Image (cartoon, rainbow, N blue to C red):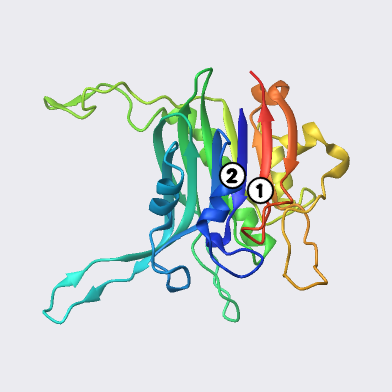
Amino acid sequence: MEVVSYNIQFGRGLDRKINLDRTCQSIEGADIICLQEVEVGWQRSGDIDQPKAIAEILPQYYTAFGSSFDVDNSVKNEDGKIVNRRRQHGVMVLSRWPILSSRTFNLTKMHYADKFNMQMSFVETVIRAEHKVFRVYSYHAGYLKWEERLEQVKQLVKVYRRSPEERGAWSGKPTIDGDDWSDQKQTPEMPDTAIVCGDFNCPHNSPEYQYLIDNSDLVDAWQLSDPANLNTSTRRQDITEDIKITGKIDHILVSHDLVDCVKRVMIDHQAAGSDHKPVRCFLEF
């Protein structure tokens, strides 16, 4: 099974052109794909619904999109009729197998008077593959200060640890006062097994990364596969000839029961559809 984590920067490549077809071409073929910086209704990306566009480009995948950044983008026509639109920026999961359930969580946001900062989020999905049922998270942390990211990763850990106890999207008996709230469907599972992917905006030696490792059973797939090269870059700070490397800030982590399944991790340095590079993790069951 191939898992990919990729901050697509809304499809804007190193040439500064937005091209979702190019972005999708570099990830097509993977079994599970976690994307960050997917947007809806932004002028810079043509006011399109990118989750919908990506699903149309890659119709062989089930998809789930989550956004905590959600602001008005509506217009009023001359006849007074309002066309309701939202401007969103979030994360996405694509899967070859059905996504049984999905939840989106807000992350702590701090205010900086001299810097732009926005609401960030992560999405939790449950996927039933041929061989296993597992949780998959697509996570995107803030980029400004480690103190903010530490609070954000604490929220991720809290949800990660609590979810199996909460059970699925619904739990318990299916009826309330005679009404069937299950829609005659089986209760979605919430397994212990998990894969956490995303742009953490921090390297492996940062306080927030260390908190994640110390307070969960998660193990960095890169640490399992190639510990000597933990600083391999997944992001380029600019697109000038003198490219500054910021280090490995995109990570794929697995729950402890998947440690022996991780066979290889690599960074796709050929991809040109973002200022980040896709991280690929290969597992065998």
Secondary element at image label 1: loop
Classify the position of the N terminus by image quarter.
Answer: top right
From the viewer's perspective, is 75 left or right of 168? Answer: left
Classify the position of the C terminus by image quarter.
Answer: top right
From the viewer's perspective, is 24 left or right of 204? Answer: left
Tell me, for residue 27, which label it has, or none: 2
Secondary element at image label 2: loop
The residue that appears at 83% across and 72% down in the rendered structure is: 242
Disc 1, disc 2: CB below 8 Å?
A: yes
Kindly report which numbered mark, 1 or 2, lies closer to the viewer in this rendering: 2
Name the image quarter holding residue 216.
top right
The residue that appears at 39% across and 34% down in the rendered structure is: 101
Residue 94 in view, yes or no: yes
The residue that appears at 55% across and 44% down in the rendered structure is: 34
Measured as percent of width and height from the top left, residue 191 is found at 50, 24
Name the image quarter holding residue 69.
bottom left
Viewer-side residue, 145 vs 31? 31
- Image: 95 above or below 78: above
The type of residue carrying mark 2 is Ile
Residue 215 in view, yes or no: no
Measured as percent of width and height from the top left, residue 214 is found at 71, 38
The type of residue carrying mark 1 is Pro
* Residue receiving disc 1: 278
Measured as percent of width and height from the top left, residue 282 is found at 68, 30
Measured as percent of width and height from the top left, residue 62 is found at 42, 37
Viewer-side residue, 261 vs 206? 261
The answer to which of marks 1 and 2 sits earlier in the sequence is: 2
How many numbered discs, if any? 2
Assess disc 1: are there few (<14), some (14-19) or many (≥20) residues with their C-alpha within 10 Å of its C-alpha.
many
